[in-house]
Amino acid sequence: NSNILTLSGGSNSLKPQTAETWSLGADLDPLPGLRLSATYWDVKFKNLIASPLGTAAGNPARYFQEFLSSYIILPSQADIDALLGDAKTVTGSPCSPTPQCLYIIERNTTQNLGRFNQSGLDLSASYNRATGFGSVDVALTGSYIIKREQSVSATAPMVDQIPAGLSRLNLRGVLGANFGKLRSQ
């Protein structure tokens, strides 16, 4: 009778994740009622807090390929003792955690898994004009993702996280009017 032991919860060795962020932007008002804005931003996370199964997003092949230290097939008693010592919660095994009854141990604890970098450009343009009944306005805002990459450990290579065919650009447009105290948008 082979069983799976799943270790979950927070790891006892969990450290805070940190990030270096910066941005540079400008706002221009070239004509009355017209505003143009652009901001470049960059975020670099270290010690990213996540769980291996959550990071693999339900992809077993990715989990078994990228998180080699998160599972042990046919564990020894020393493996079992070491992993149980680092877990806050243990689920999934009706038998005593011994090598005779376990086929695999999955270490799905929340832990410091790697790095995540993202950068982009935020743009906006808006125009507001007074009228005899109130005002009319139009605005267009957008965000363009330049880079989005992640590694599964501090030393693993960064992997592009923008799927092929996915637009890097997100836009939102608004057309509105004010009629006295009434707003239509």
Image (spheres, helix red, strand yellow):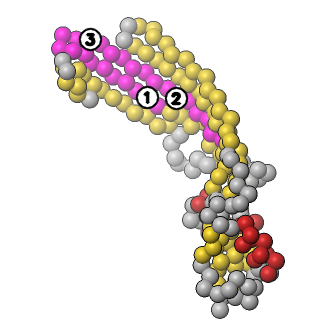
Q: Is residue 128 magenta?
A: yes
Q: Is residue 172 visible?
A: yes
In the rendered image, the residue lying farthest to the right is 78
Query: Where is 95 relative to 170, above or below?
Result: below
Q: Amino acid at mark 1?
A: Thr
Q: Please identify the quarter of the rendering in which residue 80 is found.
A: bottom right
For this rendering, which residue is in front, 173 or 51? 51
Element at badge 2? strand
**Magenta part of the chain:** 117-142
Identity of the residue furthest to the bottom in this view:
1
Instruction: Choose top left, top right, bottom left or bottom right for residue 109.
Output: bottom right
- Name the one closer to the observer, 1 or 62: 1
Please name the residue that numbered disc 1 is placed on. 141
Magenta-drawn stretch contains 164: no
Q: Quadrant of the C terminus?
A: top left
Between marks 1 and 2, how big is the CA–CA gap? 8 Å
Q: Residue at x 53, y 40 (%)?
A: 168
Q: Is residue 10 left or right of residue 178?
A: right
Magenta span: helix, strand or loop, mainly?
Answer: strand
Q: What kind of residue is marked 3? A: Ala
When the figure is inspected, residue 12 is found, relative to residue 18, above or below; the finding is below
Give how far across and how far down residue 129 sits, in percent.
30, 13
